[in-house]
Every structure is written in C-alpha cells, then in structure tokens.
Image (spheres, rainbow, N blue to C red):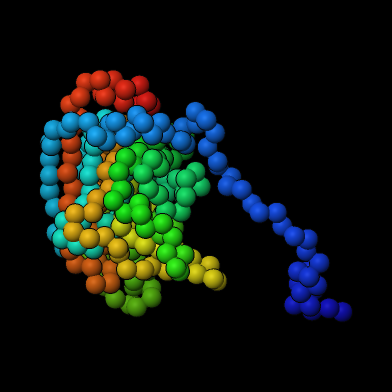
Amino acid sequence: MTTPEQDGAARLAARKPIPKPVPAYLPTAGSPLSVDKNLYSTIQQAARILTDEFTIPIRSGRAWTASAGSIIRISTPEGPQVGDLNIWNLHNPRERFWASRTKQLHASHVSTYDRLWSNLPFMRPMLTIIADTLSWYGQDEHGGRVHDLLGTRCDPYINNVLSGGEFDFHCHSNLTRAVMEYGLNEGDVHDVINLFQVTGLDEKGRYFMSPCPASKGDFVEFLAEQDVLMALSRASVSLLFFALGVSLSARVCSSTKRLADSILT
Ligand SMILES: [Zn+2]
C-alpha cells in the first residue's frame, strides 16, 4: 500500500507537460477591458480646473465625492507613503469597488489604462487609471509589483488575534471613521487597492510587502466613470509616515468632455 506522499510523487512524475497558460481575460478589440488609449490620453492632457485639494495627515483617513468625468489625483507630496482606497457609487453604496474581479480582469497590480470595477450585479468601471508615475516599476527582482490588489487593508481585529494589541488606527478603522459623515458604516468598508504599495507572492505563494518606491510628487490619476464616493486611509505600516495628497479636478475642454461622456456607462 502506498502512502499519500508516494502516490503524490508518482502522480507528479507521471504528469504530462502543462502548456503555458494564457490569461483568462485577454481583452479583445473593442472590449471594455481595453480602453481607447488615445481618448484617455487626450483626457489626461486636457485643461482642468482644480476644484479641491487636501492632504491626509498621520493616523487618519478621509472621504470625498467626485462627479463622473472628473479627475482625481492621489499623490505622495512628502515621499514614500502607501494609501488604502475604497470606492462607492455616490447614489447607491451597494455598488462598490470589487478588488478580486478587478484583479482577474486586469492584473494583480494595476497601472495606466486599467479600470477599477464594481461588484455584482453592477459590474461597471468605477474609475479608470489615466496616469501613474510609478508605471516604470514593473516587476522587481523578487517578483514585487506596485499598486496592489493581492492584499487588503490592515485592521484591528487581525492585529488583536496575532499580537493581542488594541491599536485602532489601522486603515479599516480610518476608512470606517471617514465614511460615517456620508451615512455609511464599518460594513460598507471593503477590500482596497493599496496605492503605492509593492507586494507579491514568494516561491511558496506567501504574501509579502516591499518598500514603497514613491518619491515626493509621485501620483496616480483616475478618471471617474460614474459619480463616486471615495475614501482613502494613510497606511501606517513599516516606516512610512508621510502625508498623502488628493486633488480633484474638473475638466474644462468641452470637446474632450463630449468624448468622455460617450464612454461613461
Ligand atoms: Zn493599513
């Protein structure tokens, strides 16, 4: 009688070569997964009016609204800093960002021209990334990439389970406090995109985080594809203690606005 280990080894030895897999969701021409790069580039470069600007200080989060067609820039004005972002449909918070599906549709880490999609039954783009000053990062020598969808927000519950600590300025708590003024609560906080965060999976599939490569003035810009409520927490992991900047812009070029309106869903 063979042991499970012997049986497994025999099956592994007998396994036929596996063809190189292809991505499950390769965009075809005209697919909503592949945006019109010329159009989005035109939108990114069009004239804008700055409508709001603020920084998020240590141990806090903040929520804000952005109307469809506006541009949201999230930056690192002081140096390396990671931010945990949540997104809701402004008019119906049951529609919210779906990190897992976005990861399937695009990649484990996203950059320019990728979209952030909403949950079921909505399944619509909420934001499209139109600029990313860290797009050069690619894949580092350990397999790490930036703007992470593999992980999620830090929270006080797992902190308590693992260490018994009572620290309550984790991103989950910061996001919860930030959305209260919009009538939402802890149950509305969902899996995030970790902006400016480098992560990956090691040779055993274990999640790891590497130092944030952002410098002063790095940014990601999003085009709002629908009216959204957004909330951002300044992550306090490792030695990152800088502020995050957020600026909201309305585009003013009317021809570009018409182009953008035609792609809004
Ligand atoms: Zn965090």
Q: Quadrant of the C terminus?
A: top left
Q: Could you tell whether 205 is left or right of 78 in the image?
A: right
Q: Position of residue 35 (x, y in %)?
A: 42, 33
Say which of 17 and 225 sits in front.
17
The answer to which image quadrant residue 10 occupies is bottom right
How many marks the image carries: the answer is 0
Above-or-below relation of 229 to 161: above
- Residue at 13 percent across and 52 percent down: it is 55
Q: Could you tell whether 1 is left or right of 238 in the image?
A: right
Say which of 64 and 252 sits in front.
252
Say which of 195 and 166 sits in front.
195
Above-or-below relation of 248 to 54: above
Above-or-below relation of 85 to 214: above
Q: Position of residue 42 (x, y in %)?
A: 29, 31
Q: Quadrant of the N terminus?
A: bottom right
Residue 207 in view here: no
Say which of 22 and 153 sits in front.
22
Q: Residue furthest right?
A: 1
Residue 11 in view here: yes
Q: Could you tell whether 113 is left or right of 10 in the image?
A: left
Q: Position of residue 189 (x, y in %)?
A: 33, 51
Q: Position of residue 147 (x, y in %)?
A: 36, 55
- Residue at 45 percent across and 69 percent down: it is 142
The answer to which image quadrant residue 115 occupies is top left
- Residue at 42 percent across and 45 percent down: it is 98
- Residue at 28 percent across and 20 percent down: it is 258
